[in-house]
Every structure is written in C-alpha cells, then in structure tokens.
Image (cartoon, rainbow, N blue to C red):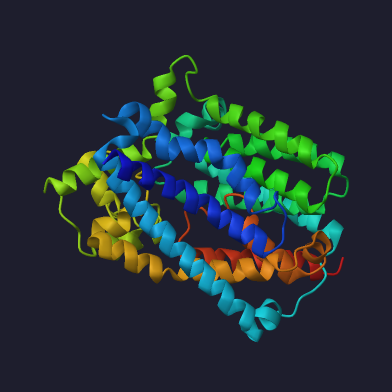
Amino acid sequence: MTFLYSLNILFFIFITIFKVYYLSRYFRLGFLNPISIPFIISLPVEIMKVFGGPMFMLTDGLFNVWFNYALVVTNIELAISFIVIYFTIKFSERNSFIKYKLINIFKPYNPKKQRMILVAVFFLFIFFVMFILLSKDFGLINWLMSPRTGYQLHRTGKGQWYALSLLFLSTSYTIMMLYTKKVSNLFFVFTIYVLLVFLLGSKGFIFSYVIFFIIVLWLRKSKYFKQAFLIVPPIGFGLMMLNFNLLEFIEIVSYFDYYINSAMYFESYFKNEIDLFYGKIWLTDFYKYMPRAIFPDKPFVYGFLYVNEFFYPGQAEKTNTPAFGGPMPAFADFGFIGVILFAIFDLGLIFKTILLYILYKNIHLQSIRNNSNNFYLFVWILAPSFMNFFGTIYSIILFIFIVKIISIFNRIKI
C-alpha cells in the first residue's frame, strides 16, 4: 500500500505542475507568466494545504488511508479537468467565432487614462462606504484594530457588505495598477491597497494582491520584475502570518486542515456513519444567492454546510465553517460518479478556458489598456479576489454594473 500511496501523491504533484506547464507552453508565455506566477508563489501554501496538515496531524501522516482516499478523489477531478481544458482549447483554436469574433461581440472603445484613474478612485470610495456599513455593529475602530476578529465573528447578516467591499477594492486596485503611468509609483499603490485589503481580515486576499502586483510587473516588462518576484511574496506571506502565534508551530499547521477534514469525512463515509446526500447539497446551494439581510429566515445550514454540520454541529450558525480539501461537495452528493460527472460537465471551467484562450493568445499591456473589451476580459480573469462570494448570476449582474460605471466615466462629456 505504501507504493500505491506514493504513486497517488506523485500523480497529484505531476498533474498539478503539468497543467501549468502545458498552458504556459501552449500560449508561448515563457517560464514566468500570469499562469505560472500564481502557481509558483502559491506553491508553499498549496503544499501546506494538501500535505502540511496531514503530514503532522494524522496517524501515519501522508500514508494515512483516509487521506489517500481524499487525494484519489482530487486526482480524479484534476485529471478530468485537464482533459476538459485540453479539448476546449483545441475546439477554440478551430472555431472562427471564438478565435476572431467573440472578443468583439460588443463594440469596443478606447478607455482614457485620466478617466480610468478617476473611476478607480470612485470604486475606492464605494469600498470605504461598504466597509463602514460592514463594521457598523462591531465598530469601525474595533474592526481597524482587529480585522481578523471582525472577519471571523462579525460578518453574520452583513456578508453582502463584506463581499461588496472586497469586489470594489479589487476593481479599484486593478484599474489603478494598469493605468498608473510610472512603474515606481506602482509600489506606492501596491502598499496602500495591500494595507486596505489587510483590513478585511483574510490571509488569502492579501496573497492574491501580491500575486497580481507581480503579474502587472510582468505585463509591463518592468526591470524590477525579477527582484519583486523574489522579495515581495515573502513580505506578503509575512503579513498572512501576523494572525498566527509564530512560537506555536502546531497552530500554523492546524490552520491547514483541509485534507484532515476530508480524511475525517472518508473515514466516516466508509464506516457508514454518514450517507451520501443524493443531490441535497447541489439543490440547496442556491441559498448562497440570498443575502441574510434581505432574507432573515435563510437557513444557516445548506449546500455543503450539511457536511460541516454533521462534523461540527452548530458551527455554521456562528459562521465557523472549516474547509474540506478536494471536490467534496460532488462526492458528498453522489460519490465517485458525482465527481466524474461534475468534472466533465463543468460549464464554468469550459467558459473560463475559452476566455483564457482569447486573453492569452495575444496578450499585451497596450491591447488591454486601449481596448475596453480586452480590459474587461483581463479584469474578469485576473483581478485579485474578484467576484469572491458571488454565484454566477450575481457575478454577471455586478460585472455589468461595473462595466456600465466604467463606460459612463469614459463617455461622459466634461
């Protein structure tokens, strides 16, 4: 079994790296590019997510049988997803509509630099309004003094303000980074926005802003790119670690409990302690579209939270929802068949791959700055932590709103 477990682990490493290698080589982007940069910078965190917790916290470490069940399910999804990506790209390169016409389905215009800076300031202002509404109950000063406490304990009933704060800050940051003229000024802009996203209390958002900064330097072909690539990510990682007691190694390791939780699930599943939900998770997931402020009777347990509730009773109501690693919602609903079918018919992945093909087949800074359609595509794909917490329907509505605001700022006569 040790041999099989080793193959399981090696396959995960191979398929994860190979997808990045394939896309980078297909689009001829070089070793460091917008696809590989997030992967390389996030690699230590991803390794800790998958292997760190189980290695130190589970009996038999990485050779724990239940952890390997969780990893097998993940490998199945990763392998099928890569196949879907491969055939979607091959289809796209042979389809003239996708290749030449889709990007111009709406008539583009040339965004004006000064107007774009102005609209970035406008979205920054909206961020501050959303943040004040978010922190109203906990207190603005209290939230500023302890963002992590606000994030963990004071979002119930105000999740819409939190999600909108993140969205508008991301939009403002993206525009500012693209249209700030001098590269030297980018470091100042980056510092300001990282401090602002730090106030939202989530470590992952800080890292996404760091990654986006490096991507923008790559896109600008900046002479500071390689230095920033080596220096800035450790600083961002340090900001993430501020919320940990660095003297307690076990505290850091226990944070990466994704696959520990998944291993716990598979142990319970194969011991017949928890049954499949047969579509209940998928059917009730629509509740995520309903803001609790508007629908106060919205249940606290829905979608994958049914699994959380089984292992952590009552925690969902306290907004404490430990994460599970891998395609657990699909498995918890329909088992291995669910994982396979959800991966094959992942319309979101197919659509995203088509957009990736359009963006990366000829990506240049000027084409993004000077063509509104290219700019919107860039924002949708690469803006950091963009549309987090929003389902497909809300994401489309909000994106149309953002597009309209930017268009008005560029077209209005002053």
**Residue that protrudes farthest toward the left in the picture:** 272
Image quarter in which the N terminus is found = top left
Quadrant in which residue 248 is drawn = top left
**Residue that protrudes farthest toward the top in the picture:** 247
Residue sitting at x 25%, y 55%: 332
Q: In the depicted view, which residue is nearer to us: 179 or 29?
A: 29
Q: In the depicted view, which residue is nearer to us: 324 or 177?
A: 324
Q: In the depicted view, which residue is nearer to us: 136 or 408?
A: 408
- Picture coordinates of residue 153 (x, y %)? 40, 34
- Picture coordinates of residue 171 (x, y %)? 66, 54
Residue sitting at x 85%, y 59%: 113
Asked if one can make out residue 258 in the rendered structure from this viewpoint, the answer is yes
Quadrant in which residue 5 is drawn = top left
Counting every numbered tag in the picture gives: 0
- Picture coordinates of residue 223 (x, y %)? 85, 42
Left or right for 1, reference 403: left
- Picture coordinates of residue 194 (x, y %)? 66, 37
Left or right for 35, reference 65: right
Image quarter in which the C terminus is found = bottom right
Left or right for 50, reference 33: left
Quadrant in which residue 51 is drawn = top left
Asked if one can make out residue 393 in the rendered structure from this viewpoint, the answer is no
Q: In the depicted view, which residue is nearer to us: 307 or 227?
A: 227
**Residue that protrudes farthest toward the front in the picture:** 3
Residue sitting at x 56%, y 63%: 398
Residue sitting at x 57%, y 47%: 165
